[in-house]
Image (spheres, rainbow, N blue to C red):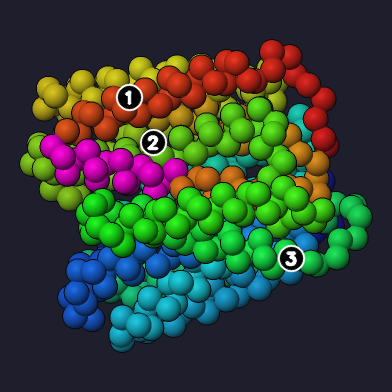
Amino acid sequence: MPYLSEQKRRSALVFAMGGLGGLVMLDETVLGVSLPAIQSELELSATTAHWVLNAYMLAFTCFAAVGGKAIDLFGLRPALIVSCTVFAATSLIAGFADSAALLIAMRVIQGLCAAIMFPITFAAATLTFNVDERGRALGTLAGTATMFLAAGPMLGGALTEFLSWRWVFWLNIPIVAAAGTLACFLWRAPARATMKPEIDRIGLVLLLVGLTALIFGLMEGPDFGWGHKLIFLSLAAGIIVLTVFFLWEIRQSAPLIDVRLFQAPAFVAGVLVFMLTQMSKIVVAVLVPQYLQGELGYSAFWAGLGTVIAVLPIPFLSAPAGKTADTSGSRRPVLIGLSVLVASNLCIGAAMLLDSYLYLAPVLLLWGIALPFAMIPAGRITANSVPKEKQGEVSGLIITFRLIGGTLGVTLGSVLLAVGAGFSAVFWIMATLFALTAVNCHITLPLKRAATPR
């Protein structure tokens, strides 16, 4: 858009990409409230209804790394146009679905599109801004997207109650059309070497088979039982095939995923923080409403409203967290953020033993304040660890680990509640994981700001 200054164009691009990222996150959370109405109208079994949710997440998780690679190979704008168009079309069809087969098929295709759209948002921010500005850009991106995530359950409930569950899907169309069109106009590709669109087919097959087996096992373990032969074989196959994938990729001159990136300790530390913060986010979003309903007797609406206090600070503090990292480096905010997350998770677990929301609310707010100061600088660390031509690939990797973290969060909660450990135990284990990650970051993150690829 020629009438915009360069700075305004870049800022507007980040907001447009935040809308796309928010749409993808919205689709993760908005449907849960509508699921009983879908199950009743389409006469679905509990298992089939479960897959209306899981089909999207499984496709999204397994193809996110490949989606990021597609950006590097084919360019951001073509990937954006195709994925947004197909996402809108499948949302339209899903809204008219009259059978489980059609609805689940559309959800799978939506997940495939999300696997391209979501890495695009991260790659656009890192490619558009220089190293010293990326933290603020990623913070703005995350803050915009998180607004959609927080609104998901309430929006899904309102649409289902006052209109129809079908509007949960149709709502996607104007959002993806507006954000996608705006992003296409605002995007300017950086100068880079021409890349031949090649894909390591053997690596692709190994990655998809390994991730599908692993994520299926993690998703279905709580339902089938962790001792079930199918779950054991699925998890074992996933670990074995992903190990073979790693060994294959490290020997390739043009790998599907450059696994050598994991030889950099700072990159690994950033990925681990990003995965763990997402795991914590899912634990709070899923288990706090369950606790408020099951232990304190709240209605679904009030439980959702009571949980909002935890995510409320994230949209407003994400950009300041990124700016702080740009100014002073990522090490200090990451370590401070992780330390406060240790304390807040310990306090959440303790407050749950007191059976009073008055004790729980302040520590949920503290958790929401700390999360962006760990998460956003961690994304900046991973982005600044690699050159521009690797940004799409890295975006896909980060999104994959983010989704695996979310799956592990659901799994952790399901397992501990199933064995009678209680809600508090989940948060105390999260505190332990944050503490271990903080120690790792203290050791591996550089004390001084090093020169990084621009």
Q: Is residue 289 left or right of residue 401?
A: left
Q: Residue at x 42, y 53 (%)?
A: 236
Q: Which dot, 2 or 3, sits closer to the camera?
A: 3
Identify which amino acid the numbered label 3 is placed on. Ile
Q: Earlier in the sequence, mark 1 or mark 2?
A: 2
* Residue linked to disc 1: 345
Q: Residue at x 30, y 41 (%)?
A: 412
Q: Residue at x 20, y 50 (%)?
A: 301
* Extreme residue in the top direction: 447
User: Can you say whether 403 is above or below 307 in the image?
Assistant: below
Q: What percent of the width, then of the height, locates residue 267? A: 66, 33
Q: Is residue 106 magenta?
A: no
User: Can you say whether 239 is above or below 167 in the image?
Assistant: above
Instruction: Work out whether residue 3 or residue 431 is closer to the camera in this orientation and state it.
Output: 431
Bounds of the magenta span? 405-420
Asked if the residues shown at circle 2 and circle 3 are in contact, with their CB atoms under 8 angstroms apart, the answer is no
Q: Which dot, 3 or 1, sits closer to the camera?
A: 3
Instruction: Work out whether residue 180 or residue 413 is closer to the camera in this orientation and state it.
Output: 413
> What kind of element bears circle 1?
helix
The answer for how far apart the CA atoms under marks 3 and 1 are is 42 Å
Instruction: Work out whether residue 1 or residue 251 is closer to the camera in this orientation and state it.
Output: 251
The answer for how far apart the CA atoms under marks 1 and 2 are is 9 Å
* Residue linked to disc 3: 199
The residue carrying pointer 2 sits among few (fewer than 14), some (14 to 19) or many (20 or more) residues within 10 Å by Cα, namely: many
Q: Earlier in the sequence, mark 2 or mark 3?
A: 3
* Residue linked to disc 2: 280
